[in-house]
Amino acid sequence: MIEARNLTKDYGEKRAVDDLTFTVRPGLVTGFLGPNGSGKSTTMRLILDLDRPTSGSVIVNGKPYRDHAAPLRQVGALLEARSVHTGRSAANHLLALAQTHGIPQRRVDELIDLVGLRDVAKKRAGQFSLGMGQRLGIASALLGDPQTVILDEPVNGLDPEGIHWIRNVLRGLAADGRTVFVSSHLMSEMSLTADHLIVIGRGRLIADLSVEQFLKQSSKNLVRVRSPQASELRELVLGPAVAVSSDEPGVLEIDGLTSEQIGELAAAHRIVLHELVPHQASLEEAFMDLTRGELEYQAAAGVEVAA
Amino acid sequence: MTATAVGSTTPLGEKIRVTQPRVVLSEWTKLRSLRSTRWSLLAATVLTIGLPILGAAVISSHWAQRSAADKASFHPLDVALIGSQVAQLAIGVLGVLVISGEYSTGMIRATLSAVPKRLPVLWAKAAVYATVCFLLMLPATLIAFFASQAILSGHHIQIAFSHAHVARAVVGAALYLTVIAVFSLSLGAILRNTAGGIATFAAILFVIPPLMNVLPTSWNDAASPYLPSNAGRAILAITRDSSSLAPWTGFGLFCGYTAVALLLAAVLLRRRDA
């Protein structure tokens, strides 16, 4: 369980996290979603007491992180930036972290096998590929068999097999009743793993809802219609609550009516339909809709950016 | 992959928690598992032993050709301790790296996530590094002393370990290098940057002392003995010129400077974002 209350962090003049209040519950995978630079990593650093909040607070499993006697038992974290000395072997890296808590060597060996780094465990971490680095980071996060797992962009740099693996790890951790908090800037990734979403933009909370709600709320009920009598149909459906757009001749995108309503309307007026497709906005579109205006660096549409 | 495979099959019981001795063990693992550590410490040890042997051999082979003035100004203890001059550079550079290396690689985030109270990490790093340096440097300075004096004895120009102040100076060299270890580590923790830490260390030890010569002599004489390097090295001196501090006074002052640096490092470590 992670509870953030009015969490705010300034770096000099810049406000990275702005009055965030949210709760991450156990037994679910909670996706932490936002465009790059929206404050996700900063929030995670604040949870781990790596950075001190300017105001507000965040507690993990009932206490500030630093007040736990065995922090690695409470929270395991994979931060986006690498947190490994490049000159040390994976095995020694894990051992050094384990020793701070008196976690036995056996647990270290177990994790090396679990994340599939056995063959390279004695190699220096600086020689690791991005994917191997992520696996080592995940091994570090799971070292203390923690109640809460925080992962910042865990699929970055993983190959498809690795991505599949991490999704299963996350689902397994949540099924165990643990709190799983995973950040991503990709909605599509979240839709496959997350149950709940916390969406931020420019450090502010935009949404805190289930994935299902998110999709329902965000998707426009667009219906794509292809008809040789498109212009007739257009006149027929247009109304105060209905918008119609057309990208190509003979095709209408109707917003505001269901496909049933359109089909019945067309039948009643003897209009031939060749295609009638209800179309949910894609997840990425829904996410873009939600965060529009909250992007830190938004390219001006249709305008040359070059000065 | 099933859920149970993620959880620990090794029971992690109530005894799992952070303690200062455990953090010390962890820092020992970190120190011994880096190549840079092994090379720097090997270099420091080899230089501490090798340079005095080399120096003694050169002096012995040319002793007959030396002028009377040269012979008069020669002191056998100086030869025995020349290695410490170079060893302090290796120990100082490594001391900075012990902490700055964690910041440059990002390891510090893993370290402080495991020990979010933070201060046990600084104490453990200082204790482990100081202990390792002392345990290497004490035998090294003793070996350097006896080996170099054995070579010099060919010309009967050696000094005995039992001679007044010799034991203090030889053991003092190892103590001085140990405090250098903590001093440089503190600088690394304050500056959190390898280049900045090493430059500051070199400036304090090697650059500022000769710069004092541009001051008027009376100012120079008044201030120089209190510089960290000069104060610390008083414990290595067997002959004293009028301006320098007494051996233990000087060494005590150097320990004081080091304590202030370590304390500042502790305050900053607690306060700053990692």
Image (cartoon, rainbow, N blue to C red):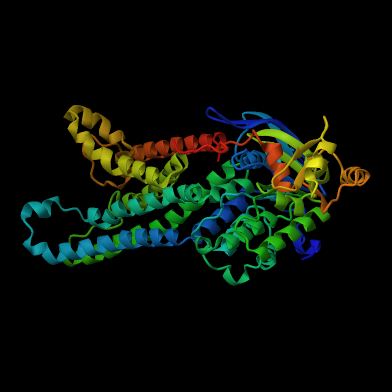
Q: Is residue B27 left or right of residue B220?
A: right
Q: Nearer the viewer, residue B234 or B199?
A: B199
Residue at 30% over, 57% down: B161
Q: Nearer the viewer, residue B96 or B18?
A: B96
Q: Position of residue A139 (x, y in %)?
A: 66, 59
Residue B273, compared with residue A135, is above or below; it is above
Q: Position of residue A212 (x, y in %)?
A: 83, 45
Residue at 31% over, 36% down: B227
Residue A178, compared with residue A135, is above or below; it is above
Residue at 71% over, 55% down: A144
Q: Quadrant of residue A51?
A: top right
Q: Is residue A24 left or right of residue B192?
A: right
Q: Nearer the viewer, residue B196 or A24?
A: A24
Q: Quadrant of residue A47?
A: top right
Q: Position of residue A49 (x, y in %)?
A: 64, 39
Residue at 35% over, 54% down: B90
> Which quarter shows the N terminus of chain A?
top right
